[in-house]
Structure formats: C-alpha cells, structure tokens
Image (cartoon, rainbow, N blue to C red):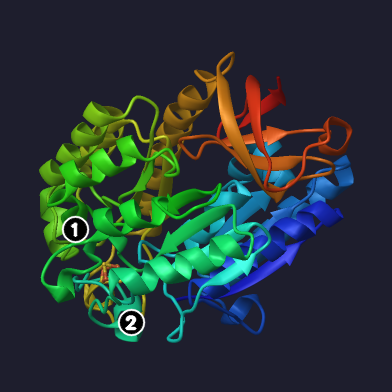
Amino acid sequence: MASYHIETYGCTSNRGESRRIERALRDGGHHPADGPEEADVAILNTCTVVEKTERNMLRRAQELQEQTADLIVTGCMALAQGGQFREADVDAQVLHWDDVPGAVRNGECPTATPDAEPVLDGVVGILPIARGCMSDCSYCITKRATGKIDSPPVEENVQKARALVHAGAKELRITGQDTGVYGWDDGERKLHELLDRICDIDGEFRVRVGMANPKGVHGIREELAAVFRDNEELYNFLHVPVQSGSDDVLGDMRRQHQVREFVEVVETFDAHLDHWTLSTDFIVGFPTESEADHEQSLALLRETRPEKINVTRFSKRPGTDAADMKGLGGTIKKERSSEMVDLKMDVVGAAHESMVGERHEVLAVEEGTGDSLKCYDEAYRQVIVTDADERGADLGDVLEVEVTDAERVYCFGEPV
Ligand code: SF4
C-alpha cells in the first residue's frame, strides 16, 4: 500500500477523473500523503488547453520528479502529447487515467477494507467476495493487512449480489485480493460455482470478475471458461496478472505460477470464447530481472497479446523481502519500462483498432467527459458514446452501437 500525492489541472471533467482515481486508490488501501515529498508516488493530472499550460505542466513534472520517488503523468496532455515528457527527459510513467490505480498498486493485489461490504455506486455494485490470498509474494505489503484467504459461503455472496441487483446495480464488480482462490480455504475453488449462481439472479445486469492470480485460475480454467461461455451476464474479461515472462523472476517474486500455466489459461479461454479481453500486469525492473528475463516478458506479451495491460516499474515497499534485494539502477528500469509500454501501446491499440466497423452491445456505466458516457461491451472494452443527452442515452442503458473510431485504449461508438 502506497501513499500518494495527486495534483489536478484544467477543467471539471479532469477533476472528475482525479476523483475517480482517488476513489480507486483509497478502495485499494492507499492513502494520501502530506505533500509530494512525503509520497511514494506523485500523480500529475495534466491539461493542455494552451501552449503556456503545456510549459507549466512540463515544469511541474520536472519539479515533482525531484521531490517524489515515482511520478505518474496522466490527463489530456499525457494522452495527446505524452512524447513531450520524454523529450524533456521527465522520468515518469505516462498513462491513461484508467491505468493509474493499477500502476500505483505496484503489482500487489487490491486491498479491501477489513469490514468490506457491498457498495452501490451509481449503477455499479461492488461485491467483495472474500478477503486474503493463498500467496506470499516477496514484493507485497498488502498481504500483511489481508492475511490468508477467508471465503464466506457461496449462498451468502449470492444474497449480497441479489440485494445489489434489487437496489439498482446494472454492473456487479466481483472483487477480492485473488478471486481465483475463492473457496480454497473451504477445500475447493468455487469461483465458477459462485458466478453461475450470481448469473441466475433475476434482473438485467452484467458481471465483471476482479483480479484472479494465474495459479488459482489454472486449476479451474476449463470450468471457469465454460461458465463465461454459457452466461451472457458475464463480461468476457479476465484479469490474470502474470508479472513476468521469466520463471526465474517469478520464483524470486514467490509467485506461485509458472509462465506455462498462464499461457494455458489464455489458451483455454481462447478455445471457449471468440471475443474476450485478457488483462494482465507486468512488473518491470524487479531486482533480479536480467536483460534476458526482460526479453522473455516482451516475448510473452507479443505471444499472448493482452488487450489490457498494466505495466509497473518496480519500486521497493518497506518491510518486504524484495526491498532487501539489491535493486537495478533507475536508468535500466526506465528503459525497460519504456520499451514495454511502447509494445503495450502497439498491442492494445491494434486490438481497439480492429473493432472499428463492428457492432457491439454496450452497457452505459459511468459519465465521461462533457456529455459523453463510458460504456463497456461484452468483453469489457471501453466504448465512448458522445452527445448522450441528444441521443437519449443514460446510465444503466444497454445500447447497440457501431464502433466508429478507436484511440489506443478505448473506442468511440454510435448507437444504431
Ligand atoms: S497474491 Fe501476492 S501480491 Fe496479491 S495479496 Fe497475495 S501476496 Fe500480495
């Protein structure tokens, strides 16, 4: 868990994005710092209305990189002119707003609060299904707060899900440190059984499954893929953080899976589902990562082509075993992370570009910039619908859209 400092410039919609980032960070157990000098990570949410603003943003980024261990630059200037930060030699991760919480997480699983109860936020119902995990990753500080997996019975979670749907939830988000090991403390993994039961609830809603580590998913991959195939309520979206393409590094990270198991999960889902989204995370620059290990991570990314990728530059968390390892130099970490982010942008961009001209059924989940809605298709790809008022579209609506254009990490769609 990290302390963060966030600075926001520009319009109300940018401030809205910062509020969303902060909410996700606090939900993940992170906390605000007393200024950039005290923070593990500083987040600069930029604006780019006029040239003078751009110069101010670059200057502020340069100041913040001196004051804080890690800097993330996001917002309009990061998206439209991200290259300028590199040209100015700013040592920052340049990210879309949606990718910021994942990068702050530093490869750790999200942390639920101890009394994690379901929450309804607009049309989104957040349902924590269990606390804890079955792992002991060497870089993780979350584990201390969450402990070993503790899974309530299936029936209890189904009742909570039903209550959320009856209260108006159109999208249920199933969360936990590691949803793939739900039930393991009770003798067997039961994520597939729970999802099947939740999809049986009366009502119109979709379900997004939160992070599940490859080891937990691997043992139930056939059953899980079949549940996704058979229930249209489930977004065809699986977040399985692999973290490295090298078994040696995975061993040093004390991850419980090997690369082969991750690939087998992907192959199983490929066999069962036509349109689905693989989401994964890579930690770049782990202390024992050699150049050859890094090349293996790039090769794995090219091979499996995830449509959503969180790239985190390794940073030490005090009190973890990885913090005692001799680290790599900042320049090596920066170069490897830039290389992986460039590849990620190519892979993710191609996935969204290939959707142009297709028709999809999307659910409007959040308000976007101006009069737009952030919608998600069957595979949880983000599709922006503009001029929502004019089109009579509202949150919670299911719309048939044609994809008309694509940015790197999202598409634009017009209702048909
Ligand atoms: S799976 Fe690893 S990173 Fe996630 S909470 Fe457990 S020990 Fe931490």
| Label 2 crowd (10 A; few <14 / some 14-19 / many >=20) | some
Could you say which quadrant of the image residue 339 lies in?
top left
Quick check: which quadrant has ligand 1?
bottom left
Q: Is residue 56 left or right of residue 157?
A: right
Residue 111 placement (x, y as % from top left): 42, 74
| Label 1 crowd (10 A; few <14 / some 14-19 / many >=20) | many
Q: In this view, does 327 lie to the left or right of 413?
A: left
- Give the answer, above or below, for where 260 lies relative to 24: above
Task: Decide if residue 380 is in sight here.
Answer: yes
**Numbered marks: total:** 2
The one of 35 and 247 positioned closer to us in this rendering: 247
Residue 148 placement (x, y as % from top left): 23, 80
Q: Is residue 402 left or right of residue 210?
A: right
Q: Which amino acid does label 1 sit on?
A: Gly
Of callouts 1 and 2, the N-terminal one? 2
- Give the answer, above or below, for where 360 lies relative to 71: above
Does label 2 point to a residue whose CB lies under 8 Å from ligand 1? yes
Picture residue at 78% right of the left edge, 60% below the top: 15
Q: How far apart are marks 1 and 2 (CA)?
A: 17 Å
Does label 1 point to a residue whose CB lies under 8 Å from ligand 1? no
Task: Decide if residue 316 is in sight here.
Answer: no
Residue sitting farthest toward the top:
357
Q: Is residue 203 left or right of residue 208?
A: right
The one of 411 and 222 positioned closer to us in this rendering: 222
Q: What residue type is labelled 2?
A: Thr
- The residue where tag 2 is placed is 146
Point out the image quarter for the N terminus.
bottom left
Which secondary structure lies at badge 2?
helix
Which secondary structure lies at badge 1?
helix
- Give the answer, above or below, for where 342 lies relative to 21: above
- The residue where tag 1 is placed is 216
Residue 56 placement (x, y as % from top left): 81, 54
